[in-house]
Image (tube, rainbow, N blue to C red):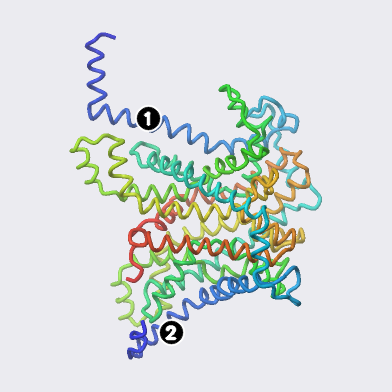
């Protein structure tokens, strides 16, 4: 890098370089003003007793962090987040893989099904979260009614402390669209010859899936697992619209804990500490994705 | 069934043709029920939106309303004093369109630079694009709130409408991927004709990248139209609210009782996204596939 910087370059190359920086300037400004600046500001503020006004801040060192770590609700929300992350990775990703395998079959009308399966993802938002409250209604909802028809007494879903997290995981399985499509593209990228030679060796459907598809797909699988972990940290809409962290604290996840502290309890210093912790977790995940996944997933960085 | 026929059946099932047919049947046996399950939330939404209130709470629940009450849409829309859906929709539309244009302009410039221009430090900056690609905005919301507060932007649309003009890593990445596929010879030919980078971008890259730009526009539309976190955070007064926030206020206002009206407005809110998705489906799917798989 340093050697390359000191290399003399021609005037035309210099002009191209100026244009390069001119073109990336908007992004660069945005990066500094809206991301990098705030991140370090946040780190600084997490060491202060900041409540509402920024005008008389006291430096309180690591007090926010020790308060945070002493708060049982913080740990509940960490546990809840972990629960949902694991649920979404285990059930969401395997479900998306099942869908991708189905959509990879050569049958007529497959594009239609692909659209249908993707649809709930694009409409995921407040409107559909409201519908889900209704679907999960223990007495009148369609879910428990359907279960009753097959002889099962359904639980109270989002109104129950034990079932609220599974409910949110079930609901998230309706918006696995992006990871389904990424897996599908991955499946289509597996070389046909591998299947052919597996067939010659007498492999059946399952053996082919187990020994050819899964290993060939592992980098993509890895990538979608990272994506679904990251998106598990973002599930604010459902929590705000459907449960508000309840019943009790049983669906209080980190992003809700952050929101409550920042904008309801006005404990902004503590919220900044939570945000900083979240940021570190997410950057670590991205780092892992880079290290482990870049060779297969992200192709070349310089071309 | 005679023994001979049974034997033939087994032979057929094991033949190549037989296995293929069984495979297709099995596939549909899964595809169709799953498809119905995926559509269920929409059926529930639409059917509740069309029912009179007394049927909403009827048991057993019916997907097809006994009587269809179209007035629900108008009643819901104009139904509640301080939730003005017309204003909210207008605000959502304004923000969404601005953000699509802002994203397209800023990301096209950056993507062209990363795909086609040589410069020292390029790899370093591109690594930053990749590193920030997965970072959700939620993690930065507290400090951004402080920042916009300092700017005096709270309760205006500026915190939502300005940042999109400063690029978005995911879009820059997708567009750059697309720009890399445009043949170098076209660029060289244009350079010989004396075209500068601005002209190459405008006259070669943008016309050739319509599918990719359409993909981005669709992503941006859906993301911004559904955005709930930002508006909830930055907007206070009813006049500036966006549609998702309006829907939630409606929920609070009615204490969860007027479900038929709420579902009616929810249906209206979802329609633009549905239309965009149906017409832009192909672009959408291709765009997402690009993000995860090596090219």
Q: Is residue B251 left or right of residue B286?
A: right
Report how many numbered discs are placed on residues in the image.
Answer: 2
Crowd band around label 2 with a 10 angstrom C-alpha radius: few (<14), some (14–19), many (20+) = some
Give the x, y percent position of residue B211.
42, 59
What residue is shown with label 2? A18
Secondary structure beneath dot 2 equals helix
Quarter of the image for residue B146 reads bottom right
Q: Please state which of residues B63 and A102 is positioned toward the viewer in this rendering.
A: A102
Give the x, y percent position of residue B138.
60, 61
**Which mark is drawn over residue B26?**
1
**Which mark is drawn over residue B78?**
none
Quarter of the image for residue B196 reads bottom left
Query: Badge 2 sits on which subunit?
Result: A
Crowd band around label 1 with a 10 angstrom C-alpha radius: few (<14), some (14–19), many (20+) = few
Residue A146 against residue A186 in the figure, above or below: above
Identify the image quadrant of the C terminus of chain A. bottom left
Query: Badge 1 sits on which subunit?
Result: B
The residue at 22%/46% (across/down) is: A193
Identify the image quadrant of the N terminus of chain A. bottom left
Q: Is residue A286 left or right of residue B183?
A: right
Residue A88 visible in the snapshot: yes
Quarter of the image for residue A65 reads bottom right
Residue B147 visible in the snapshot: no
Q: Is residue B89 left or right of residue B79?
A: left
Q: Please state which of residues B118 and A61 is positioned toward the viewer in this rendering.
A: A61
Residue B231 against residue A33 in the figure, above or below: above
Check the image and name the residue furthest to the top.
B2
Check the image and name the residue furthest to the right.
B81
């Amino acid at each position: 890098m340093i050697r390359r910087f000191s290399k003399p370059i021609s005037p035309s190359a210099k002009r191209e370089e100026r244009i390069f920086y001119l073109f990336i300037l908007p992004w660069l400004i945005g990066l500094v003003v809206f991301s990098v600046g705030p991140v370090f500001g946040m780190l600084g503020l997490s060491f202060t007793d900041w409540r509402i006004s920024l005008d008389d801040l006291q430096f309180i060192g690591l007090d926010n962090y020790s308060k945070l770590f002493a708060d049982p609700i913080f740990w509940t929300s960490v546990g809840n987040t972990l629960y949902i992350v694991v649920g979404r990775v285990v059930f969401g990703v395997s479900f998306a893989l099942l869908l991708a395998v189905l959509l990879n079959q050569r049958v007529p009308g497959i594009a239609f099904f692909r659209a249908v399966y993707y649809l709930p993802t694009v409409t995921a938002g407040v409107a559909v979260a409201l519908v889900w409250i209704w679907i999960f209604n223990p007495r009148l909802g369609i879910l428990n009614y359907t279960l009753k028809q097959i002889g099962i007494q359904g639980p109270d879903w989002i109104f129950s402390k034990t079932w609220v997290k599974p409910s949110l995981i079930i609901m998230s399985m309706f918006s696995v669209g992006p990871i389904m499509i990424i897996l599908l593209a991955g499946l289509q990228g597996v070389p046909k010859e591998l299947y052919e030679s597996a067939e010659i060796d007498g492999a059946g459907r399952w053996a082919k899936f187990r020994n050819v598809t899964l290993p060939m797909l592992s980098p993509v699988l890895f990538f979608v697992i990272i994506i679904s972990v990251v998106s598990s940290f973002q599930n604010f809409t459902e929590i705000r619209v459907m449960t508000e962290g309840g019943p009790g604290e049983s669906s209080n996840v980190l992003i809700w804990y952050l929101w409550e502290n920042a904008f309801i309890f006005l404990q902004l210093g503590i919220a900044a500490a939570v945000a900083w912790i979240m940021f570190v977790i997410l950057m670590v995940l991205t780092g892992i994705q880079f290290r482990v996944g870049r060779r297969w997933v992200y192709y070349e960085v310089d071309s | 069934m005679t023994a001979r026929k049974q034997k033939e059946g087994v032979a057929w099932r094991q033949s190549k043709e037989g296995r293929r047919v069984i495979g297709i049947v099995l596939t549909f046996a899964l595809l169709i029920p799953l498809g119905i399950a995926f559509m269920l939330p929409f059926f529930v939404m639409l059917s509740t939106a069309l029912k009179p209130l007394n049927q909403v709470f009827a048991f057993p629940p019916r997907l097809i309303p006994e009587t269809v009450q179209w007035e629900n849409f108008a009643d819901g829309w104009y139904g509640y004093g301080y939730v003005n859906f017309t204003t909210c929709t207008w605000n959502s539309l304004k923000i969404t369109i601005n953000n699509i244009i802002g994203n397209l302009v800023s990301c096209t410039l950056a993507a062209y630079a990363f795909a086609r221009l040589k410069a020292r430090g390029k790899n370093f900056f591109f690594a930053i694009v990749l590193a920030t690609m997965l970072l959700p905005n939620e993690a930065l919301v507290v400090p951004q709130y402080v920042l916009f507060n300092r700017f005096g932007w709270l309760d205006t649309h500026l915190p939502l409408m300005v940042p999109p003009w400063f690029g978005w890593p995911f879009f820059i990445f997708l567009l750059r991927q697309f720009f890399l596929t445009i043949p170098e010879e076209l660029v060289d030919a244009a350079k010989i004709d004396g075209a500068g980078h601005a002209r190459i971008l405008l006259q070669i890259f943008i016309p050739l990248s319509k599918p990719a730009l359409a993909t981005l526009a669709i992503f941006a539309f859906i993301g911004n139209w559904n955005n709930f976190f930002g508006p909830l955070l930055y907007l206070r007064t009813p006049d500036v609210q966006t549609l998702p926030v309006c829907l939630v206020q409606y929920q609070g206002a009615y204490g969860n009782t007027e479900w038929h009206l709420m579902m009616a407005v929810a249906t209206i809110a979802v329609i633009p996204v549905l239309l965009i998705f149906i017409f832009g489906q192909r672009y959408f799917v291709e765009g997402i596939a690009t993000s995860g798989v090596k090219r």
